[in-house]
Each structure stands twice: as structure tokens, then as C-alpha cells.
Amino acid sequence: MDILETIYNTPAGRFVARKAGLPDPPKLRRGRLMPAGPVVLGELPGGGIAMEAMALLGVAPGQPVVDLPESRVKDDKGRMVPPRYPARPGAIIVDATGLREIVQLEGIRALLRPAMRSLESSGRIIILASDASAVEGLEAKAVAQAIDGINRTVGKEQRDGCTSNLVFIKRGTRASDLVSTLSFLLEGRSAFVDGQTWRVGPAKVSNALSSRPFDGRLVVVTGAARGIGAAIARTFARDGATVVAIDIPPAGDALAKVANEIGGSALQLDITAADAGAQIAAHVASRHGAERRIWALVHNAGITRDRMLANLDEQRWASLMEVNLAAQMRINDFLLANDVPGGLADEARLVGIASTSGVAGNKGQTNYAASKAGVMGYVWALRDELGERPITINAVAPGFIETDMTAAIPFVQREVFRRTNSLGQGGNPVDVAETLAYLCDPASGGVDGQIVRVCGQNLIGA
Ligand code: NAD
């Protein structure tokens, strides 16, 4: 439970907390909710894909961005303040896909400066840029990476629940490939994704965007009895999926509750069983019909066995590697290799859960960090191995998320983890779930081999 949020929720608590100078974590806009204010489009020379994608999304660009003063201006109380956009924009999309020269980077500064103090709360900065692999010449490649530096810094300077994210566009990407990403970033679904960068490319199979993308589709979620897994099951069900919820037998009651609540089915299974892949397919075929195929397979089950390396025994190492890494690879191997009843759909989505511990390392978590970095390495390697098969594989890397797993962290350490990100609070399980649902969206075929951090721009590590 977030103590500051609890304190600030009562008038007396708010009064005392303000007097004591305690930070007031902003309430984040969540769910399938667009920004309230206009979506400003800042198109820099050579751009164009953002305008096309916005048209496909049915979002009209907000007021044109022209003639803003460069110097500080007077606000309505006569104070000198930095320039702002006239209306409070809900989002600004910067189309920087045409930038190739260092001098052109200035254009991003000029567009974003007035946004820094005028975005509505939980507003969005979305920067689109050409991927380094899609541009020629050293200067253009350096410029692409420079934009990443802008994005990460803007994320840290933004306030009030606003986020900044950068999408690199690969060669051959069409506006239709971008729509699911733009929709995710604009909506409250991306509440806890901040300061991040990932890549979108041409989808092997294009599907239209829908507000119920999983209607008629079956999704398997491991570790679904509680925490993030239960939120994943609920989020996919909200978006139309029939969910197969998996967890170990001791969690059977909680698992059945989740499955019943969302009209799915429960499978009690330890994912480390050698034949887990076959058991999952058999369950799908027997409970949901032999013709049914798995649209998305969400490998969420995971454990911690924390010890400083000096105290870390072999048992704590081996059991964790089995659950967090080896089991999902075995399950995928089986289902990718065997076209059995209840097996994978041709265009299936495979997703896993890494962790910021796997990105940056974390004291007392050599085993956990290894398993989660392994998930990332596996995503990249399997992506290459899948070749032209239209199956996608991605992962999310959560930072501090409020669950039973993190409730077990000692208080002081927990408060430090929870606050040291650009949004000043822990994420909710639904934030991870929404990001996974975006990656598994039928319209996200161009998002492949990516790791998306859901960490509020965790200040620890990269
Ligand atoms: P949790 O402990 O609350 O839930 C994990 C679930 O997985 C449990 O229901 C558990 O019974 C199940 N499970 C464990 N071993 C299993 C097995 N062998 N077979 C089937 N089910 C099994 O954890 P959580 O916080 O909800 O985390 C979910 C995932 O997110 C994990 O992979 C975790 O490593 C990852 N993650 C969590 C955080 C966080 O802050 N909570 C941060 C980064 C990554």
C-alpha cells in the first residue's frame, strides 16, 4: 500500500503531510481514456507519418504550433514565466522522423519548451524518430540517438504525472503499423511507462485497431491467481479475451476465483513440469474446443529467492531459474514446434516479464536479475529465430509494482524503490497488464522483439 497516497487521501492527512513537506504523488490517468485537452502535432521537416497515423486513429491535431515567444512571458498574474501553449494540451506528438542533421535537433527543443509547463496532468509527450538502422550516414545515426537523450531528460523534468516516450520507426513502417502504439501512448493505459524508447517496424500481418481487440480470442496467463497475473487476466478479459488462468495447485482457490470472475477457465499447473506445454494445449482443446488456438501466451509466473551472493545457495539459484526462465522457454519450444489441438495461432503473441533488476542489477538478487536479463536475451534471440513467421515475441520490464511480492520488501528499502522514479510512486499491476495487452494487440504486429519498461522511469540503472 502506498503510504503517502493513503495519507493524502484524508483532509487531515493532507494538511499534515503538506506542512511536513512530504511529496504528494500525482494521481495518474489510467485505462482506455484519452487526454482531455487537444493533441498537438508538431511536425518537423521531413515528417508526415504522425499526421497519417493520427488520421487513422481519428484524432484531429490540436492548435497549430506557430509564433510562440522564445523569451519568458507574463502570465495572467503578471509573473514572468516560460512560454506555454495557449490551451492546456493533453498531449504533444513530435514528428522528428525527418531529422538527419545536428542543427535540426533544435526544432524539438523549440516544440517542447512551451509544453514543459502547459500540459494537463497525466499529459503526454510522444516523440517519433527514424531508427538509426533506417537512416544513412554518421550524423543522422548520431542524431537518432541524440533524440533518445532528449526524451529521457524530458521524462525526468516533466511533472504532475506527465510522461515522455520515444518511438523509433524502422524502415518500411506504415502509418497503420504505428496506430496501436500511438493509441496506447495517448491513453491512460500507458500511465506508468515514462522516459522509454522502443521500436516499431512493418507488421508481417496488419490488423485494424479495435477497443475490444481480443474479442473471440483465447489468451493464456501463467501465475494468474494474484498480483500482476490476476490484473493481466482481468485486463485481457475486459478487452474481450477468453482467458485460461494458470497457477500452482496451492493457489487453486484464488485461481478459481479469478477465472470465474472473468468467465475464463482455471488450470492448476506448475509451469516447471516437463510437459507443461502439452498440458496447456490439452486444457485449451478440452475446455474450449479442439479448434481453438492460443492467440497470446503471457508468461507472468515468477518468484524471488533473494540473498546476497555471499549467502546464496544452489537450491535458491536453481528453483528460481526454472520458474523464471527455463519453464517459459520449454513451453514456447513445445508449442512453436507442435501444431497440436489447442496450440498456438499462426499469428500468436508471446510475451514475458523481465524486470528493471535484470536491466540494472539489484543487491541481493543475482539469481533474479540473471533470470530476468535472460528473459530479455531470449526475446531478442527468439525474434531472430522466428524469421518470417508472423508470431511476435516481446517482454515488459516492470519497476516497482504494488503487489504481495514487493510488500515483502523491508519498509525503508520499499519506500526508496517506490519513490525513486520520475512519477514518485509505485506502479499498479494494471499498468503492467495494459502494456502486455498493447504488445499482444492484433494491431501491434509491428512491435516485435521489444522490451518495454513499465517503471515510471525508474532512476536506478539505465
Ligand atoms: P506474485 O508473487 O504476487 O505472483 C506470482 C504468481 O506466480 C503467484 O500466484 C504464484 O503462485 C505463481 N507461480 C509461482 N511459481 C509458479 C509455478 N511454478 N507455476 C505456476 N505459477 C507459479 O508476483 P507479482 O509481483 O505479481 O509478479 C508477477 C511477475 O512480475 C513475476 O514474473 C515477477 O518477477 C514480475 N515482476 C514483478 C515486479 C513487482 O514489482 N511486483 C517487478 C518486476 C517484475
Image (spheres, helix red, strand yellow):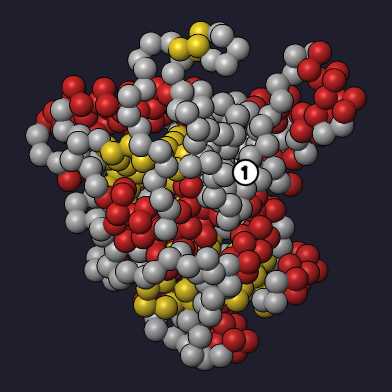
Residue at 27% over, 50% down: 49
What is the three-letter code of the residue carrying label 1?
Arg
Q: Which residue is mark 1?
A: 29
Residue at 70% x, 21% y is 23
The answer to whether 26 is drawn above or below residue 131 in the figure is: above
In-front residue for pair 17/60:
60
> Where on the picture, by quarter, is residue 196?
top left
| Residue 243 visible, this angle | yes
Residue at image coords 44%, 77% = 344
Taking depth in this image into account, of 217 and 183 the one nearest to the observer is 183
Q: Residue 414, percent across and down?
A: 70, 31
Q: Is residue 172 above or below residue 294?
A: above
Q: Along the horizontal axis of the image, is 402 left or right of 393?
A: right
Residue 377: x %, y % from top left: 37, 49
In the image, farthest residue toward the left: 137
Q: Answer yes or no: is residue 367 visible.
A: no
